[in-house]
Image (cartoon, grey):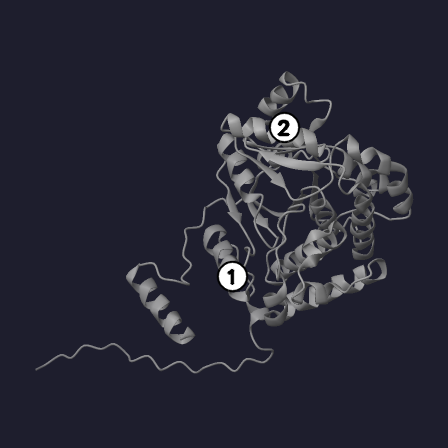
């Protein structure tokens, strides 16, 4: 029973042992600043918001709010898509990206409701849209419009390209492309970490690259997309995208810093996140590793990936190791583990490893009835005549 598991965990804690469901840790004296991390496409999975929507009123409220913002721009219902049994939406970029955006925003707002407030945000590719909203640079309506209209525009490129993840440093990948004269058809799309680089280009050239990697024992994995983001393939969309997004109204941020993986800088004036910025965010390479190094250099050492599955924590850890910076990386959910228990466990990890106080009030009933504790027997000592 659940009660039995809790009692066993408490008994193990008293003995200094490990047990299922028991979360322990030693917090660092200097926990540094906290960063919310928003990945791009790739962390989605069937049913990723189903359990949490049914069991967490906090998550449900924020997801419903996102659904209302997306509704004017989509022809489908976000909540029905995420909680239903039809998983065909996973094969369409114009549903995957808005669904991921909404899920990440709702997860980030859930962390904040429990008392975890970010000092900075970082986003990868489309993840920057969610990051900009959480930082306060984009209203929810503007962010919803950007992610839906941009992903719908991407459909026009379906079948023209692809992307491959290669476990090599970017310098080695560029040398590989140049040496084999592939650089006319393939370009580096993302610098994720010291040993992970994303390449984009035509499907035929990517097939040749993958075959080469297999013959030379280089780990390479095709990403399930049929377009080449962050490459010259995006350029035909320039006029259409900037026209669609011309009237968005980016706002100045206050206390949450927006670190751009487009420019590798802390953008102080976020009113510059206009239509041109969101086109360049889709066209230019993602400088995730360099921006992570900038964050580390500025004292940000706790990274919470607010996504349905952690896809960037390994890159963050590798980058931190190369800079000899001690960091803490915490996921939110995991593929096929999207329950409230999993979320609360990661909240507990945040508390035990960073000493960040958690506001557990949202998890309690509105008017909880306190349980009377047994009285404490006074200690005494008998003195015999």
Residue 251: x, y in percent? 82, 48
Residue 277: x, y in percent? 81, 38
Judging by the rendered image, the residue that carries numbered circle 2 is 208
Q: Which element is circle 1 on?
A: helix
Residue 32 found in image quarter = top right
* Quadrant containing the C terminus in the rendered view: bottom left
Q: CA distance from mark 2 to mark 1?
A: 41 Å
Residue 14 horizontal side relative to residue 353, left or right: left
Classify mark 2: residues with Cα within 10 Å, few (<14), some (14-19) or many (20+).
few
Q: Nearer the viewer, residue 135 or 33?
A: 135
The answer to whether residue 354 is above or below residue 231 is: below
Q: Residue at x 13, y 79 (%)?
A: 383
Q: Residue at x 76, y 39 (%)?
A: 282
The answer to whether residue 367 is above or below residue 212 is: below
* Quadrant containing the N terminus in the rendered view: bottom left
Check the image and name the residue furthest to the left.
385
Image mark for residue 342: 1
Residue 193: x, y in percent? 57, 34
Q: Is residue 168 visible?
A: no
Q: Residue at x 55, y 66 (%)?
A: 340
């Amino acid at each position: 029973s659940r009660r039995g598991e809790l009692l066993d965990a408490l008994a193990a804690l008293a003995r200094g042992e490990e047990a299922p469901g028991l979360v322990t840790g030693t917090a660092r004296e200097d926990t540094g600043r906290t960063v919310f991390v928003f990945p791009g496409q790739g962390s989605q999975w069937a049913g990723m918001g189903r359990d949490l929507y049914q069991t967490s009123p906090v998550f449900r409220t924020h997801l419903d709010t996102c659904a209302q913002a997306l509704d004017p721009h989509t022809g489908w219902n976000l909540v029905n898509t995420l909680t239903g049994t039809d998983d065909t939406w996973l094969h369409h970029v114009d549903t995957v990206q808005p669904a991921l955006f909404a899920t990440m925003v709702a997860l980030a707002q859930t962390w904040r409701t429990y008392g975890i407030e970010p000092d900075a945000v970082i986003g990868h590719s489309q993840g920057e849209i969610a990051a900009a909203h959480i930082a306060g640079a984009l209203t929810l309506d503007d962010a919803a419009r950007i992610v839906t209209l941009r992903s719908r525009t991407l459909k026009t490129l379906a079948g023209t390209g692809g992307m491959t993840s290669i476990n090599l440093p970017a310098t080695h990948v560029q040398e590989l492309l140049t040496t084999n004269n592939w650089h006319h058809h393939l370009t580096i799309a993302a610098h994720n970490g010291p040993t992970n680089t994303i390449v984009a280009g035509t499907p035929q050239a990517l097939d040749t690259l993958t075959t080469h990697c297999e013959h030379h024992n280089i780990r390479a994995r095709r990403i399930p997309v049929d377009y080449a983001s962050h490459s010259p393939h995006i350029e035909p969309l320039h006029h259409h995208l900037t026209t669609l997004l011309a009237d968005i109204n980016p706002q100045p941020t206050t206390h949450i810093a927006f670190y751009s993986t487009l420019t590798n800088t802390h953008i102080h004036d976020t009113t510059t996140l206009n239509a041109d910025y969101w086109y360049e965010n889709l066209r230019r390479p993602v400088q995730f590793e360099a921006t992570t190094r900038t964050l580390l250099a500025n004292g940000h050492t706790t990274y919470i990936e607010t996504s349905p599955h952690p896809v960037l924590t390994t890159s963050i850890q590798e980058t931190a190791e190369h800079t000899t910076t001690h960091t803490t990386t915490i996921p939110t959910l995991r593929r096929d583990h999207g329950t409230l228990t999993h979320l609360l466990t990661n909240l507990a990890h945040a508390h035990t490893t960073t000493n960040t106080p958690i506001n557990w009030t949202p998890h309690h009933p509105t008017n909880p009835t306190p349980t009377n504790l047994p009285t404490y027997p006074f200690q005494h000592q008998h003195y015999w005549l």
